[in-house]
Image (cartoon, rainbow, N blue to C red):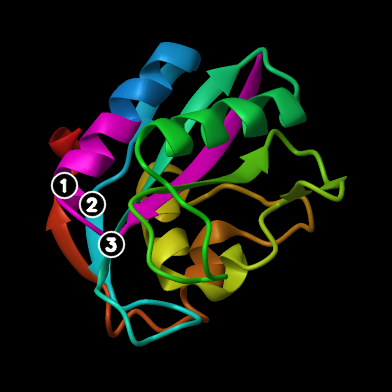
Amino acid sequence: MTNIFLGIGGNLGDRHRQMRTAVAEIRKVLDDVRVSSLYESAAWGVSDQPAFLNAVVRARTSLEPLELLDAMQAIESDLGRVRKQHWGPRSIDIDILLYGSQIIDEPRLKVPHPYMAQRGFVLRPLADLAAGLTLPDGSLVGELLTTVSQDDLRRIEGPEWA
């Protein structure tokens, strides 16, 4: 079993419901699921869109990385995710942030997630679950968190939301 971290978020429709449903579906596929607090943040990349809700999931899996990707994309699809615009609005987004200590560079999957060290809306909830975690490049989550802006990040609920 491999420890993994997923970033989840969405900004369309009933965001709370989508996030809770995504976590419920993730629990059907993965083991020992733990969830961070829930945060609201301004959109990243394409800013002219509704605010996002974001969280991080920590879990264990026996799935191989691409099998995990396929399973998470199936959940996204079941929850109405349509890929129209890069960094555009979406009902739900599930990103594989970390897969154990592996570095994966496949056409369909890059792990650690290539932008996670730049995103407060990923690092803050990741730190909720594992502030002392060392990433494959040797950096610490808690230290990375001090290097990114959290000005537009607002904690909505504690981990009991899911």
Of marks 3 and 2, which one's residue comes earlier in the chain? 3
Residue position for label 2: 38
Which three-letter amino acid code belongs to the residue tagged 3? Asn
Residue 56 in the image, given as x and y percentages of width and height: 40, 46
User: Callout 1: few (<14), some (14-19), or many (20+) C-alpha neighbours within 10 Å?
Assistant: some
The answer to whether residue 18 is magenta is: yes
Residue 84 in the image, given as x and y percentages of width and height: 52, 64
Name the mark on residue 11: 3
**Marks 3/1: CA–CA distance:** 9 Å
Q: Is residue 55 left or right of residue 46?
A: left
Residue for point 51% across, 41% down = 6
User: Callout 2: few (<14), some (14-19), or many (20+) C-alpha neighbours within 10 Å?
Assistant: many
Q: Quadrant of the C terminus?
A: top left
Residue 73 in the image, given as x and y percentages of width and height: 55, 36
**Marks 3/2: CA–CA distance:** 13 Å
Which three-letter amino acid code belongs to the residue tagged 1? His
Contact (Cβ within 8 Å) of mark 3 with mark 1: no
Of marks 3 and 1, which one's residue comes earlier in the chain? 3
Q: Nearer the viewer, residue 107 or 41?
A: 107
Quarter of the image for residue 122 reads bottom left
Residue 47 in the image, given as x and y percentages of width and height: 38, 86
Which three-letter amino acid code belongs to the residue tagged 2? Leu
Quarter of the image for residue 62 reads top right
Contact (Cβ within 8 Å) of mark 1 with mark 2: yes
Residue position for label 1: 16
Residue for point 23% across, 66% down = 40
Magenta-tinted stretch: 1-22
Residue for point 38% across, 18% down = 27
Find numbered disc 2 in the image and state the secondary structure of the residue it sits on. strand
Q: Is residue 140 left or right of residue 132?
A: right
